[in-house]
Amino acid sequence: MNAVVSLLGSSAVSSAAAWLTRGRVRAVAYHDVQQPAAFAAQLDHFRARGYRTITGGQLADALAGVASLPERALWLTFDDGDASVAQVALPLLRERGMVATAFLCGAWIGTDEPPWWQVLEAAVAPSELVATRIALKRGPDQERRRRIEQMQQALAAAGPPSVGQQWSEGDVHEWLAAGNEVGNHSWDHPCLDRCDDEEQRRQVRLAHERLSRLIGAPVDTFAWPNGDASPAALAELQALGYRLVAGCDHRLVARRSDPMAVSRLRLDTSVGPNRTRAIISGAHSSLYQLQHLVRGGRPSSAVT
Ligand SMILES: [Zn+2]
């Protein structure tokens, strides 16, 4: 498969794929930024290929038909509010005149609360990690919370508590001051489709209220935690006036896409230049959809 990705990322194939899909928007979902040099190289690649960054608000306007976008429009997003985005990504974006959207969880801003999957990683043997994570994501949310709470207690009894690297309120203001955007990523990141309807509404509403208060304007962009869409949460988002809702299904965005179901390409800083070219050109998305079709089932369980 690496040989196929290598071929897709070759200059000829990626250029052809980019040309064939030139009318589509690239929305990219990052999480943390572990490798600053690799991230800088990815940004430089986007710039060299002529991509121009847009905000979620601009994309929402374009999908509503009230504004147009540049031909090679690129929407960069970062889910979960890892501190590396504020500390590493922000200066690299700023020095290139690029903008992005950070999807934040309302409960975690200004805390050292570790996301639940980091508790899991600290508590479970590597050999059991994937299976345990899948089981927790597929079970009822109350059960996931109960198991994570047990793990946290066991970790606290064994040594110093696990600490997360979350954004401060100051990080949010600095991010916005550079022309970037903040979106809602739920209150504390459950898989919403595993929550009852009332909990789904609470997750959306609480994060909306905190983020809107913090930035001084109503937040109107949302990204599904773990990529899991759910009807009750979607209805709450619509009632709150949200204009754009993003998933994580690794497709390009057609100019007439449903703004409440916007696709994003998955990328991280461990991805090398060849694969990055394949992903951003749209070639990798086609391969991924084909693989998904052949294998059936849901895409990777590792998405957060
Ligand atoms: Zn997330």
Image: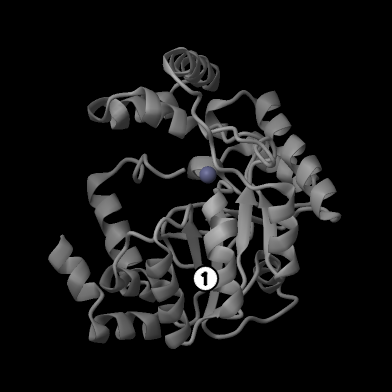
- Residue 224: % across, % down: 57, 45
- Residue 239: % across, % down: 79, 44
Name the residue: 84% across, 47% down.
213
Residue 256 in sight = no
- Residue 104: % across, % down: 64, 47
Near-viewer residue (45 or 223): 45
Q: In the picture shown, does residue 216 fall above or below 252?
A: above
- Circle 1 Cα neighbour tier, 10 Å, few/some/many (<14 / 14–19 / ≥20): some
For disc 1, the marked residue is 254
Say whether residue 47 is left or right of residue 241.
Answer: left
> Which amino acid, mark 1?
Ala
Which colour style is shown?
one colour
Seen as rendered, the residue at the extreme front is 160
Pick the quarter of the image with the N terminus.
bottom left
Instruction: Find residue 142 and report its image quarter.
Output: top right
Residue 185 in sight = yes
Near-viewer residue (49 or 16): 49
- Residue 71: % across, % down: 55, 85
Near-viewer residue (301 or 232): 301
Q: In the picture shown, does residue 153 fall above or below 225?
A: above
Say whether residue 14 is left or right of residue 87.
Answer: left
Instruction: Find residue 76 and report its image quarter.
Output: bottom right
Name the residue: 35% across, 46% down.
299
Name the residue: 63% across, 60% down.
259
Name the residue: 43% across, 62% down.
251
Secondary structure at numbered mark 1: loop
